[in-house]
Amino acid sequence: MGQGDSCTYPASCVSIGGAALLISGESGIGKSELALALIDRGARLISDDHTALRRTGERLIASAAPNIGGLIEVRNLGLLPAEPGPDSPVALLIELNRAAPRWIERSQHRMLLGLDIPEILLSPDSRVLAIKAEMALQAYGLKV
């Protein structure tokens, strides 16, 4: 991560209803696959694999990282074009993690560029992962 008011963060990112959803996790865990499933449900791709973040006042704004805007890696197919969505304020960070708890009472938080962002751990092995991600955004995401 960079310093100051901007950085590049290792996460894919989609926009749902104008709110950015960061998707992080170890390499190969399914970040791009979840982004693709969310795009199929109406989300817009902001960035795949790495996302540019900048602090604007009390908001964290996500945009495409340099040189990868409008591209998504689709496993077994390669880098393919995807219509890029608009820069959007970050509302939630989802970490794909096989050790995710079965249920939670509240979100965790991660500090990004000095701002407290809600974070949810989701198991990547769910057949309804995209639906869970949308529900997490509604239940725990910042209102933008």
Image: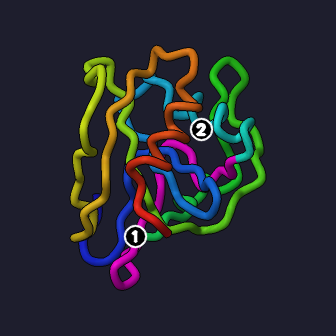
Residue, far bottom: 57
Q: How crowded is mark 2: few (under 14 residues within 10 Å), some or many (20 or more)?
A: many
Q: What is the x, y in percent for residue 70?
A: 70, 53
Name the residue rendered at 67%, 17% in the picture. Answer: 76
**Left or right: residue 54 compared with residue 127:** left
Q: What element carries label 2?
A: helix
Q: In which quarter of the image is residue 38?
A: top right
Q: Quadrant of residue 57?
A: bottom left
Nearest the viewer among 106 and 29 is 106
Name the residue rendered at 75%, 46% in the picture. Answer: 82
Q: What is the x, y in percent for residue 122?
A: 38, 28
Please identify the dominant SS of the magenta region: strand
Asked if 101 appears above or below 89 in the picture, the reply is above
**Left or right: residue 19 compared with residue 6:** right
User: Residue 35, which numbered label?
Assistant: 2
Name the residue rendered at 43%, 47% in the picture. Answer: 139
Any magenta on residue 46? yes
Residue indicated by mark 1: 60
Asked if 103 appears above or below 105 in the picture, the reply is above
User: Magenta stretch?
Assistant: 43-59
Asked if 135 appears above or below 103 in the picture, the reply is below
**Left or right: residue 133 compared with residue 120:** right
Placement of the N terminus among the 4 image quadrants: bottom left
Q: Which amino acid does label 1 sit on?
A: Leu
Q: Which amino acid does label 2 sit on?
A: Ala
Asked if 8 appears above or below 82 in the picture, the reply is below
Nearest the viewer among 129 and 2 is 129
Mark 1 or mark 2, which has the lower sequence index? Answer: 2
Q: How crowded is mark 1: few (under 14 residues within 10 Å), some or many (20 or more)?
A: many
Q: What element carries label 1?
A: strand
